[in-house]
């Protein structure tokens, strides 16, 4: 079973485009998607619904029957966020699942936590892939869906592979 973990972004396509690229270029079709929603005391149900709908539509287009789970965390409770991300990876890996984390959307500290979940020393369970979708000339294409961005301007990186060579 393939599992995708990512953040709900203020830019709708920041996260969806990375999954779209992984589906198209890596044939990675997730069976389960974990969406992490950070908030400052008030849960943004509209953002959650938009993200849920966007990921569900993308999964359906590629034959996925994926389950989507939304997790809400206080955006400044860093210790809790790190523990919860580690627990997600541990749970999925202990069941034998392949885990990919998308670090493209979200805040810098979430990118740091994402990398740690893939290459952190002392972790028994680590994510298999840490994806980052690099878009050159991003400002010109910000907010556009994957097919509307010239493919020669996008590179999908597995940063775990880039860093470890494995």
Image (tube, grey):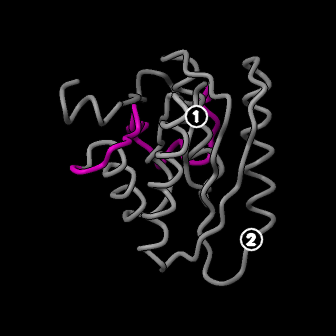
* Callout 1 secondary element: strand
Look at 73% across and 74% down and name the residue there.
43
In terms of sequence position, does the residue under pointer 2 or pointer 1 come before the other?
Answer: 1
Residue 152 picture location, percent across and down:
41, 21
Q: Label 2: which residue?
A: 44
Look at 61% across and 24% down and name the residue there.
1
Give the quadrant of the C terminus.
Answer: top left
Answer with the quarter of the image where residue 63 lies.
top right
Q: Is residue 147 magenta?
A: yes
Query: Above or below — where is 67 with respect to 89?
Result: above
Real-space Cα distance between discs 2 and 1? 24 Å
Residue 134 visible in rendering: no
Decide if residue 94 is on the left or right side of residue 121.
right
Residue 67 picture location, percent across and down:
75, 37
Decide if residue 43 is on the left or right side of residue 142.
right
> Which region shows up in magenta?
121-148
Q: Nearer the viewer, residue 78 or 12?
A: 78
Residue 104 picture location, percent across and down:
45, 47
Residue 97 picture location, percent across and down:
54, 29
Query: Above or below — where is 25 with respect to 58?
Result: above
Q: Label 1: which residue?
A: 3
Residue 40 visible in rendering: yes
């Amino acid at each position: 079973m393939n599992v995708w973990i990512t953040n709900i972004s203020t830019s709708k396509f920041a996260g969806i485009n990375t999954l779209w690229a992984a589906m198209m270029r890596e044939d990675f079709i997730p069976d389960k998607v974990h969406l992490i929603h950070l908030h400052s005391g008030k849960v943004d149900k509209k953002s959650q619904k938009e993200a849920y709908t966007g990921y569900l539509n993308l999964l359906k287009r590629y034959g996925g029957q994926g389950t989507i789970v939304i997790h809400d965390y206080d955006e400044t409770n860093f210790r809790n966020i790190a523990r919860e991300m580690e627990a997600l990876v541990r749970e999925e890996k202990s069941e034998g699942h392949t885990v990919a984390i998308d670090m493209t959307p979200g805040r810098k500290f979430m990118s740091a936590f994402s990398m740690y979940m893939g290459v952190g020393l002392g972790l028994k369970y680590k994510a298999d892939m840490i994806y980052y979708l690099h878009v050159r000339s991003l400002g010109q294409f910000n907010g556009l869906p994957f097919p509307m961005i010239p493919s020669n301007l996008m590179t999908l990186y597995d940063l775990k592979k880039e860093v470890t060579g494995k």
